[in-house]
Image (cartoon, rainbow, N blue to C red):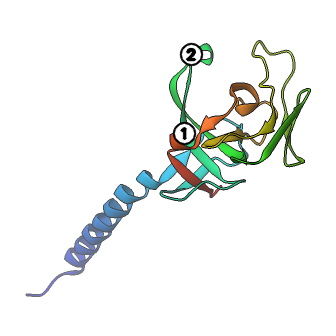
Amino acid sequence: MKYSKLNTNILWCLVMLGISLLIGMAIPRRLTITKTHSVKYHLFWEIHGKTPQKGDYVRLPLYEQKIGCAPCSIVKRVGCLPGDRLVSEGIKYYCNGEYLGQCKTGKNIAPFQFSGTVPPGMVFLVGDRDNSYDSRYFGFKQIADIETVLLPLF
């Protein structure tokens, strides 16, 4: 049976459509897109099963009625891990002496105040911008609540 150029093009389109559908079904399940500017990246590849390290971006649910999250999914960077020394000096935060950022002043939300060792099973999360709603306000989050570690793409 001899195929015409039209049939070959149709066959080629069907093959490409099938490949595109397979890729399309796999990739969105591994991508996270942020809607806010609290972190400097907006597109992330999910790395399931990786233990979060300092500096890693992570996604987790946040339950904060006072800001309208019941729940909402947030992306933040791990600033301090269990056993690290977290110090808040006024509105500035440091982990093992490394500056993490500061709180915005004039908000109706009180900053989290802590100086000491990060408790077992907990992390201190920060955004990349000082106006990020993160652990500087809501405090420690449990590592077990982290859904996935994220690799920034863009």
Q: Is residue 93 above or below residue 12?
A: above
**Residue shown at 68% from the left, 26% from the top:** 138
Q: Amino acid at mark 1?
A: Leu
Count of numbered tags: 2
Residue 134 % position (x, y): 70, 32
Residue with the mark numbered 2: 65
Could you tell whether 83 is left or right of 27 in the image? Answer: right
User: Looking at the image, is mark 2 or mark 1 earlier in the sequence?
Assistant: 1
For the residues labelled 2 and 1, the Cα–Cα distance comes to 16 Å
Whether residue 35 is visible to the viewer of this picture, yes or no, is no
Residue 9 % position (x, y): 27, 74
Q: Nearer the viewer, residue 78 or 113?
A: 113
Q: Secondary structure at mark 1?
A: strand
**Residue shown at 57% from the left, 57% from the top:** 51
Q: Amino acid at mark 2?
A: Gln
Residue 47 % position (x, y): 52, 58
Q: Nearer the viewer, residue 130 or 138?
A: 138
The part of the image, by quadrant, that contains residue 69 is: top right
Could you tell whether 107 is left or right of 45 in the image? Answer: right
The part of the image, by quadrant, that contains residue 33 is: top right
Q: Quadrant of the N terminus?
A: bottom left
- How packed mark 2 is, by other alpha carbons closer than 10 Å (few <14, some 14-19, many 20 or more), is few
Q: Is residue 49 above or below residue 12?
A: above
Residue 145 % position (x, y): 52, 39
Q: Which mark is residue 60?
A: 1
Q: Which mark is residue 5?
A: none
* Farthest bottom residue in view: 1
Whether residue 67 is visible to the viewer of this picture, yes or no, is yes
